[in-house]
């Protein structure tokens, strides 16, 4: 008998819906998740939207389809809930580029200088920092600080982008997103030649040379909003491929082009319907953050949510 892939997928989706009811769970998914995960999610969003949603969740269980630091954030913001990450290996190489020890060394070099920590970081690193930010609010967060000098960790490209939009001196950390860094100026130029007139929208984790070619820079959800609101029909997209699901779904009359074949985050793609089913069935893998890290990381996340 021939394997019927779509019937199998439908069956799994039905099973996930039933399991979700049985264990009073809500599924949050990042904009970079596989199409089928976004299809089955209760809420899809960027890091800021998902953090905000996590605070308000009433269900007993939050299944976070994303990477480890995102599930950790949900757990910090709503510690009474069970937070599950379907694939325990789903990490973030950028978050791993800074450790609490290395950050403490940096802080010693710049006493009194506040640390603005991008959400793509571990809870332990957040606990050593002063305020959190996401790509949606980084400029606002930095400008809200009274100090003239700040340390920005761990993404140097986002940090540089922020520095351009503030009068403050921004001390950068040498971190980068292993996916966005792949996108080159040449690839964007080639795509622009193929689609003259197409607008180029990119995430601020891209290299500076790439960001110089943009018509719009924003978080994944800001890119989604911009593409929907603009009358243009053609867009070149400078961020992870998962974003194409909602771009295409919400704008069937528009065309979206990825300028590089390397814009896929392997970690984001680890979560499949199979792993999501297993996660709900076996309540795995629980992500928890304990005190004192919990309360210190909570304070810096709350500080961010007060700014925006
Ligand atoms: P946003 O969720 O802020 O759009 O950022 C995406 C990202 O780079 C996650 O690693």
Image (tube, rainbow, N blue to C red):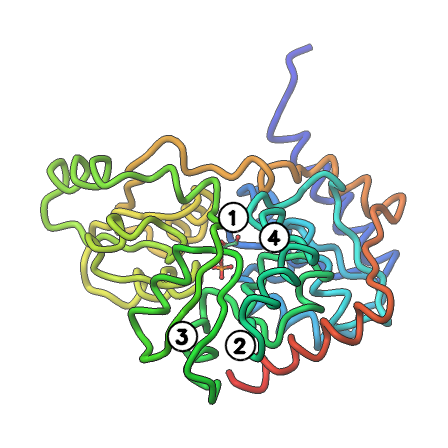
**Mark nearer the viewer, 2 or 4:** 2
Please rate how many residues cluster around mark 4, counting C-alpha atoms within 10 Å: few if below 14, some from 14 to 19, many from 20.
Answer: many
Q: Residue at x 60, y 39 (%)?
A: 267
Q: Secondary structure at mark 4?
A: loop
Please rate how many residues cluster around mark 1, counting C-alpha atoms within 10 Å: few if below 14, some from 14 to 19, many from 20.
Answer: many
> Residue 32 has which mark?
1
* Residue at the spot of label 4: 98
Image vertical order of residue 217 relative to residue 242, above or below:
below
Chain-order first, disc 3 or disc 4: 4
Chain-order first, disc 1 or disc 4: 1
Q: CA distance from mark 3 to mark 2?
A: 17 Å
Extreme residue toward the top, this view: 1
User: Can you give x and y, in whole percent of width and height, for residue 32 in the image?
Assistant: 51, 48
Q: Relative to the observer, which residue lies in front, 253 or 2? A: 253
Q: Secondary structure at mark 3?
A: helix
Q: Relative to the observer, which residue lies in front, 290 or 266? A: 290
> Residue 113 has which mark?
2
């Amino acid at each position: 008998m021939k394997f019927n892939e779509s019937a199998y997928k439908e069956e799994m989706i039905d099973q996930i819906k039933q399991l979700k009811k049985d264990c009073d769970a809500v599924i949050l998914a990042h904009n970079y998740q596989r199409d089928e995960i976004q299809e089955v999610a209760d809420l899809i969003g960027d890091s800021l939207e998902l953090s905000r949603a996590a605070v308000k969740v009433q269900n007993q269980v939050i299944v976070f389809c994303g990477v480890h630091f995102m599930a950790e954030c949900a757990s910090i913001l709503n510690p009474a809930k069970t937070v599950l990450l379907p694939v325990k290996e789903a990490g973030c190489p950028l978050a791993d580029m800074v450790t609490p020890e290395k950050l403490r060394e940096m802080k010693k070099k710049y006493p009194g200088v506040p640390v603005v920590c991008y959400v793509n970081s571990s809870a332990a690193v957040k606990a050593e920092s002063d305020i959190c930010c996401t790509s949606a609010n980084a400029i606002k967060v930095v400008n809200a600080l009274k100090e003239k000098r700040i340390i920005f960790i761990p993404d140097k490209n986002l940090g540089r982008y922020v520095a351009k939009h503030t009068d403050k001196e921004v001390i950068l950390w040498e971190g980068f997103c292993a996916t966005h860094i792949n996108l080159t100026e040449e690839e964007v130029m080639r795509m622009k030649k193929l689609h003259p007139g197409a607008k180029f929208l990119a995430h601020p984790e891209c290299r500076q040379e790439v960001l110089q070619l943009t018509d719009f820079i924003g978080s994944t959800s800001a890119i989604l909003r911009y593409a929907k609101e603009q009358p243009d029909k053609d867009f070149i997209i400078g961020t992870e491929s998962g974003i194409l699901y909602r771009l295409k779904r919400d704008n069937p009359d528009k065309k979206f082009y990825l300028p590089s074949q390397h814009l896929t985050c392997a970690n984001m793609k680890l979560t499949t319907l199979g792993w999501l089913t297993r996660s709900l069935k076996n309540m795995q893998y629980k992500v928890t953050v304990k005190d004192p890290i919990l309360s210190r990381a909570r304070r810096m996340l709350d500080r961010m949510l007060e700014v925006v």
